[in-house]
Amino acid sequence: MKRKVLIVEPSEIIVEGLLATLVHTDLKILKPEYSIDDLSNRLDVLRPDILIINPTLNDNVTELRKAARSMAVVALVYQYVKQARLKRFDAVIDIRDSQQAILQTVLEVGAKAATSDAAMSSHELTRRETAVLIEVAKGLSNKEIASRLNVSVFTVTTHRKNIVRKTGIKSVAGLTVYALLNNLIDEDTVI
């Protein structure tokens, strides 16, 4: 399956240079965006695997990923940007890099995204496990969760074991943070 790439950059000449670099790859290049107006809706619809964006437009990588969770976000740099801002990105492309270096960076990020997609799909929580996780994050006991979800305490225990196995998180605090980071609950829900 071809990895989809979306470029968000206001400079048409830079976009054209990137397109020329990426054209002969096994990547599907989506129609570029020249502004961030309505970007979150576009990300939600297109669900690119790789987003190449000028970090001066938007460096809130967490916000960008809400629309497409497994998307890799690459900073496209051609002016000074603080290193602290660039650390939020999965990779950085400098326009002074060679075509080969740019291509290698994009392909490596795409390969990592593909690997994380496969890992996530084998470890995704079921609908019922997600429901149990939400109740755990709210601070409820197994007995309270069983009562709320109309299942046995044994079933809740089984779901919790599966959640721990799939996420690798054993503590209630860790599971709560996981639920918050994956937008399963909001901060007001946590006690």
Image (spheres, rainbow, N blue to C red):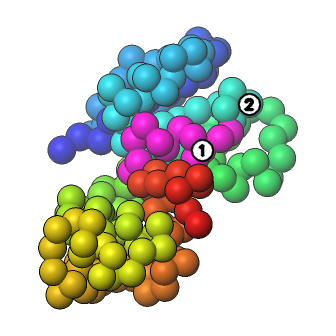
Q: Position of residue 78 (x, y in %)?
A: 74, 32
Viewport quadrant of the N terminus: top left
Q: Position of residue 20 (x, y in %)?
A: 45, 24
Q: Position of residue 167 (x, y in %)?
A: 37, 76
Which image quadrant for residue 15? top right
Q: Secondary structure at mark 2?
A: loop
Q: In this rendering, does residue 23 appear at all?
A: no
Residue at figure coordinates x 30%, y 73% from the top left: 145
Horizontal arrangement in the rendering, residue 94 relative to residue 21 (left or right)? right
Q: Magenta stretch: residue 128 in it? A: no
Q: Please report whichever mark, 1 or 2, sits nearer to the chain's N-terminal start.
A: 2
Residue at figure coordinates x 32%, y 82% from the top left: 142
Q: CA distance from mark 1 to mark 2?
A: 12 Å
Q: Magenta stretch: residue 68 in it? A: yes
Residue at figure coordinates x 71%, y 49% from the top left: 86
Which image quadrant for residue 5? top left
Viewport quadrant of the C terminus: bottom right
Q: Mark 1 Cα within 10 Å, few/some/many (few <14, many 20+)?
A: some
Write down the residue under mark 2: 56
What residue type is disc 2 on?
Thr
Q: Secondary structure at mark 1?
A: helix
Q: In this rendering, does residue 113 appear at all?
A: yes
What residue type is disc 1 on?
Val
Magenta stretch bounds? 59-70
Horizontal arrangement in the rendering, residue 20 relative to residue 64 (left or right)? left
Write down the residue under mark 1: 61
Q: Tell us which disc is closer to us: 1 or 2.
A: 1
Q: Mark 2 Cα within 10 Å, few/some/many (few <14, many 20+)?
A: some
Which image quadrant for residue 112? bottom left
Q: Are marks 1 and 2 in contact (CB under 8 Å)?
A: no
